[in-house]
Amino acid sequence: MKKLVNKKLKNEKKIMKKSAITSFSILAILLLSLTSFTFLIAIEPVDGMIVSMQWGQLDPDWETDYPDEKSIAEDVCDYIYDLFEDDYHGSWSTVNAYWDYTDTEGIETCMVYENNASNGVTFVANWWVGDFIFSFPPPDPFGHFWFFGDDTNVTDTCIHENANYFEGSPVTSKQKFNFIWTCANGGTYWNHSSGTYENITGIFYPVDEPLEEDPVNTNTIYGIFDTNDDCTGMPLAWTNTSDMNLNGYSSSSGSYTYIGFQANSPFMGDYLPGTSERTDNFPMAFYYAALGNNDPYLQHWDIDDSLDFASWDTYGTSFGSTDLYGGYWRPVIVGGNQTKYIFCKMRVFGNGDMELPIS
């Protein structure tokens, strides 16, 4: 499987020029400015438009310790872009918005377009690779979750406001599928909408050595509204629903799927735990299957089967038997030079039976 995926990457990879017109189906984003601040969307409205967005922003402090990470992450974004653009059956409008355009203004501009009913957008799929930060409480235990952005960092409040409103009026979120490869933005951190929680060693804070028994997360809520009615938690922010299944891989329902990470997420240039496979192969193989490239009839595979395909491609087993699903101890650097460990796992919320639409 992997040879096929990597061959496709080498043969089809396109490097996008951010200062030129990027054409993607009927929708076009015209990047007129050489600065990082301007998206101008040239539109030809269409009924039933489905949109794929590739986002990415890395903290520049990481470039010293992980000098290849940005180029590897960009290759993944380009690869996913190509898959959506070349989808045989699908009619996706797709664009890379990573680096210069992953900031508050980029998010707002795209979501304003998507939420405008006259543009006919019905489904948006987001791939996001990057770093996270968070503001300190309130609310406990972490405060508000943020994505690192090029010019302005992107808060959970910003995502919620722009995913669920248009010109001040509420709309149903079009952000149906979200694969968020960044730390801490896919966990359950509360057990009541008031913000109460169980403080779990190894999940909420790192430990000096891996514990003999893996910690169990007893918290059951992935997002709340604080005392100012501001959204806290990215899964809630993107979808505006608090009832996604907590294990969408094994029990699926609903209109949304959100894949994210509890605690840390591995860098694209890391090796998946317990394997000799580089991490970037996992999301590439996932989208390869999700858009039907492994299917004799090029039919899209659902999220669960695509996770299994990516797992067989990298781990040699199904997703439910991997360390990504079950969790693993990941070393983290604390205080600049001290190595500690935190228990990380990929969470799949919502509907694992979802298929990325064809039209």
Image (cartoon, rainbow, N blue to C red):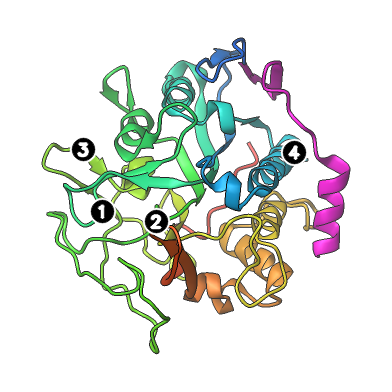
Residue type indicated by callout 4: Asp
Residue 64 place in picture, x, y as percent: 59, 47
Q: Return the residue at label 4.
A: 82
Report the side of 156 relative to 36 (left or right). left
* Residue in the picture at 80% in, 56% down: 5
Q: Return the residue at label 3.
A: 230
Label 4, label 1: how far apart the Cα atoms are: 37 Å
Report the side of 291 relative to 246 (left or right). right
Q: Nearer the viewer, residue 299 or 294?
A: 294
Q: Nearer the viewer, residue 259 or 117?
A: 259
The answer to which of marks 1 and 2 sits earlier in the sequence is 1
* Residue in the picture at 65% in, 41% down: 358
Which image quarter holds the N terminus? bottom right
Asked whether the beta carbons under mark 1 and mark 2 sit within 8 Å of each other, the answer is yes
Label 3, label 2: how far apart the Cα atoms are: 19 Å
Residue 292 place in picture, x, y as percent: 73, 52
Residue 142, disc: 1
Relative to 54, say whether 32 is above or below. above
Residue 342 place in picture, x, y as percent: 41, 70
